[in-house]
Amino acid sequence: GDPAFERATAAGGGRVVDVGAPPPDRSGDAGRDAGVDAEVLLTVGTDRYVGTSSTAFELVDAARERGVDAALVPTSHVGALLDGRGASIDRLPIGRVHDVVDGLVRERGERRDLLVVEGQGAICHPGSSGQICGLLHGARPDGLVLCHSAGRELMHGYDVDIPSVATHVDLYERVAAPVAETAVLAGALNTMNVATPPAAREAVADFAERLGAPATDPLRFDADALLDAVGLG
C-alpha cells in the first residue's frame, strides 16, 4: 500500500479499503439459468462521460421515492464507494466482466422490484467497447436507458465522430440479443453545456424524437420520465 496513507490511517485509527478490488473468481458459477425477481435496467452511453453513472444513481433514488424497492449494481470505484458494495470493472480482465456483473445482479436481484446496473463507457468508444459485451451479457437487462451529452459530436479523447443515436440503439439491442430480449426504453440527456432550462428542454425533446422514446435530463430536471417509461411506480 501507499506508506503515506498507511501512516495517516494508523494515526487516526482508520483503515485503507481498496473499493476497486476485484471479487473472487467465480467463473465456474456464471450464467444464471433463470431471471432474478427484479426488473433489471442498464444505463448505456453514446460516449464516455455522458452520465451513465449519475443516471443510474438518480434512477434508484427516484424509484425509492415512489416506494419501489430498488438497488444499484455499482460497476465503478465511485459507485462502489458510495454504495458500499460493488466492483470496479475497469480493474478486471475483459473475460471476467460478465462473470462479476452476473454475480452482482444475482446477489442483489432476489426479492427486489428494480435493479439498476451502473453503465460504463460506450459500445462504439475504442477505450471502453471491450467492457460493454460483458456488461450487457452479465446484466441481462430487461431494459436499457441510453445516455448522451447534448451537443457532443466527437468521441472523448478521439477525433472520431460519434455514431447516430439510432446506430447506438440498434447496436446495444443486437449485442444483448443472444442472452437478453431487451430494448432501449428511455434516454437520459446530459445538458450541462446547455445554458438555460428552456434550451435544455428543447434539447431533450430533440433527443427523445431521435431516440423514439421518452427522455429527460435526470440531474437538471428529474428521473420521472425514465421511471414512467419502464412502468415503475
Image (cartoon, grey):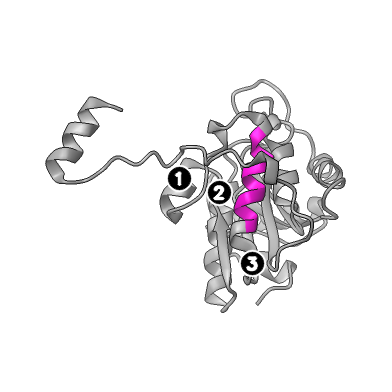
Name the residue that disc number 3 marks: 110
Cβ–Cβ under 8 Å for marks 2 and 1? yes
Q: Is residue 152 above or below residue 102?
A: above
Task: Left or right? Give the position of 27 relative to 137.
Answer: left
Q: Amino acid at mark 1?
A: Val
Mark 1 falls on what kind of element?
Answer: helix
Name the side, left or right, on which 37 lies relative to 218.
right
Q: Position of residue 13 (x, y in %)?
A: 16, 46
42 on left or right of 164: left
Question: From the image, which quarter does the N terminus lie in?
Answer: top left
SS of the residue at dot 2?
helix
Q: Secondary structure at mark 3?
A: loop
Q: Earlier in the sequence, mark 2 or mark 1?
A: 2
Give the magenta part as a residue range: 96-106
| Residue type indicated by callout 2 | Ser
Q: Quadrant of residue 157?
A: top right
Task: Answer with mark 2 or mark 3, whichever residue precedes in sequence.
Answer: 2
Q: In the drawing, what numbered circle is on residue 78?
A: 1
Label ID, residue 53: 2
Indicate the quadrant where residue 84 lies.
bottom left
Q: Are marks 1 and 3 in contact (CB under 8 Å)?
A: no
Mark 1 or mark 3, earlier in chain: 1
On residue 40, the disc is: none
Marks 2 and 3, how far apart at CA: 23 Å
